[in-house]
Image: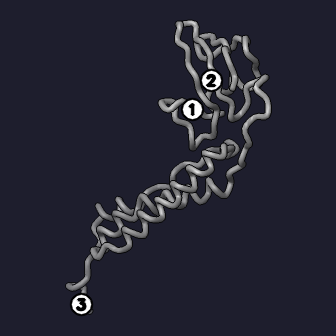
Amino acid sequence: MSVAFTKEESAETASETLLPDRPISPHPNLVTQSGLQALELQLRRAREAYEAAQQIDDVNEKRRQSAVPLRDVRYLVERLRTAQLIRNPASTDTVAFGSTVTFSRTDGRVQTYRIVGEDEADPKAGSISFVSPVARSLIGRAVGDVVGAGNQEIEILSIT
């Protein structure tokens, strides 16, 4: 076949399809049960998106549409492979991975967060990563303890 009848990938398309891998955290990959389920769902969706992209006839468009799902599949497979499921804490005496903590800040704000794995952390939805500075200062502490968090102090009001 003559090269006149083949589609050559442009430099722009090549750069769009060669995405760098998502960075993998150096911390242990601790997950809650719901975090593990969320990773499994994300992997299923990424695989579905990749499969859908494979149905595209145009080679350049297929590569473009496959790039993100393929990168996500690689990331999620690795995160599931290294996931360490941590059960909910048996006690509410001290803050632990999986605890929900309510605390007050010196500026008067009262906040409640669940301490979870890195992939499931979403501060807007009420969860923070166990490696975040606030979570690290809270873990192992009890109700009434006052700890430093940045340039503020926070007092633990409840643990559930």
Q: Give the label, 3 or 1, closer to the camera.
A: 1
For the residues marked 3 and 2, what is the alpha-carbon distance in whole angstroms?
Answer: 63 Å
Is 110 in front, or is 134?
A: 110
Which quadrant of the structure image shows residue 127?
Answer: top right
Q: Which residue corresponds to mark 1?
A: 127
**Earlier sequence position, callout 1 versus callout 2:** 1
**Earlier sequence position, callout 3 versus callout 1:** 3
Q: Give the label, 1 or 2, closer to the camera.
A: 1
The image position of residue 39, as x and y in percent, is 57, 52
Q: Quadrant of the N terminus?
A: bottom left
Check residue 134 in the rendering and tell me which mark sits there, or answer none. Answer: 2
Q: Is residue 69 left or right of residue 62?
A: right
The image position of residue 24, as x and y in percent, is 59, 49
Which quadrant of the structure image shows residue 106?
Answer: top right
**Earlier sequence position, callout 3 versus callout 2:** 3
The image position of residue 70, as x and y in percent, is 46, 63
Could you say whether the residue bearing mark 3 is in a helix, strand or loop?
loop
Amino acid bearing label 3: Ser
Q: Which residue corresponds to mark 3?
A: 2
Q: Is residue 50 left or right of residue 107?
A: left
Q: Residue at x 66, y 14 (%)?
A: 157
Q: Residue at x 39, y 65 (%)?
A: 66
Could you say whether the residue bearing mark 1 is in a helix, strand or loop?
strand
**Is residue 122 depicted above or below 33 in this figure?**
above
Amino acid bearing label 2: Val
Which quadrant of the structure image shows residue 28?
Answer: top right
